[in-house]
Amino acid sequence: MMTSSRSFAGFAALALVAGTAGAQDYPSKPVRMVINFPAGGPSDAIGRALAQKTTELWSHQIVLDFRGGAAGNIGADHVAKAAPDGYTMLLISGSFFTNPAANAKLPFDPIKDFTAITPAANGGMVLVAHPSVPAKSLKQLIALAKRHPGKLTFGSSGAGGSLHLNAELLKLTAGIDMLHVPYKGAGPALIEVVGGMIDMMFIALPPTLPHIQAGRLHAVGVGSAKRAASLPGVPTLDESGLPGFDVSSHFGVLAPGGTPRPIVEKLNATLVQALRTAELKERYARLGVEPIASTPDEYTRFVGTQIRKWTDVVKAAGLKRD
């Protein structure tokens, strides 16, 4: 037994030394940041800004790799199965937390198959409607939905994603029924709302502000607990008649499970440095979000808490887990 213990300790020491040595040389080639939704949506805007600033600071290129579909699960599965060497990252949004709640059989384990690096941004989630919808306030929207149950349509980035479950939470708390129309990403769904093919959707602020400002969309209410700085005149859903209603857009960075700790710490330090620059703060402010950061351990706990929260919402709404 003593020999086995010493051998194990020796292997562990060698692994630590190898990981540390690898981190010293890391990175030696471009790093991919997988965006698990199509271009044109919130993840694109947030990830592109973070990748560009990190590239400047790091002097090593971070390239975006778009792998949309299945409410973000296609891109997430790709990263879960990627080599844990620090050269593949995943920019997650709120759908990463809601997908495990809504899907009984994911091709990956959202906890075991990923290594948390850091959160990246938080922002207001806004409920927008096409101008043709005869409801300019939450009260009017609820009344309209109750007069025509199941007739109003809402889009999402995919079944089981955060945008879908945000609307399900609205249905549950307001006691209304609407028809869900899923798309392969927030970008395609937004195009359909702007075009009037569907009535409304929850969506993060970054790609939505220009449409609201131009009158192509109407902001019914902000989903987060406080008003958005970029939309000071738009009330929250909480203050509009749904006390306690709080859904925000969240973005963070994960790596494949098993990524060596020295590389995780180096990734964290570099991304956090980028997130704390004045340039990125200003750029994110224009997108309607604010940068946030934490240690890998803190972010690991946050991810677990969010998954449990949305699992409870799915159960309360009586949604079937596919």
Image: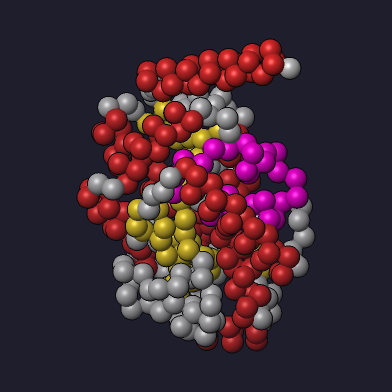
In this view, 202 is above or below 172: above
Q: Is residue 204 visible?
A: yes
In this view, 64 is above or below 165: above
Residue 110 image-quadrant placement:
top right
Q: Position of residue 280 (x, y in %)?
A: 27, 48
- Image quarter where the N terminus lies is top right
The residue nearer to you, when weighing 262 against 56, is 262
Question: Which residue is located at x 44 percent, y 28 percent?
Answer: 262
| Span of residues in magenta | 94-119
Q: Is residue 91 visible?
A: no
Q: Position of residue 305 (x, y in %)?
A: 59, 56
Q: Position of residue 207 (x, y in %)?
A: 39, 56
Magenta-drawn stretch contains 111: yes
Question: Which residue is located at x 75 percent, y 45 percent?
Answer: 105
Question: Which residue is located at x 71 percent, y 51 percent?
Answer: 103
Determine whether, in the image, residue 249 is placed left or right of residue 103.
Answer: left
Question: According to the image, what is the colour scheme of the structure?
Answer: secondary structure
Determine whether, in the image, residue 16 is placed left or right of residue 169.
Answer: left
The residue nearer to you, when weighing 129 against 120, is 120
In this view, 16 is above or below 295: above
Question: Which residue is located at x 58 percent, y 65 percent?
Answer: 166
Q: How many marks?
A: 0
Determine whether, in the image, residue 161 is placed left or right of residue 39.
Answer: right
Magenta-drawn stretch contains 25: no
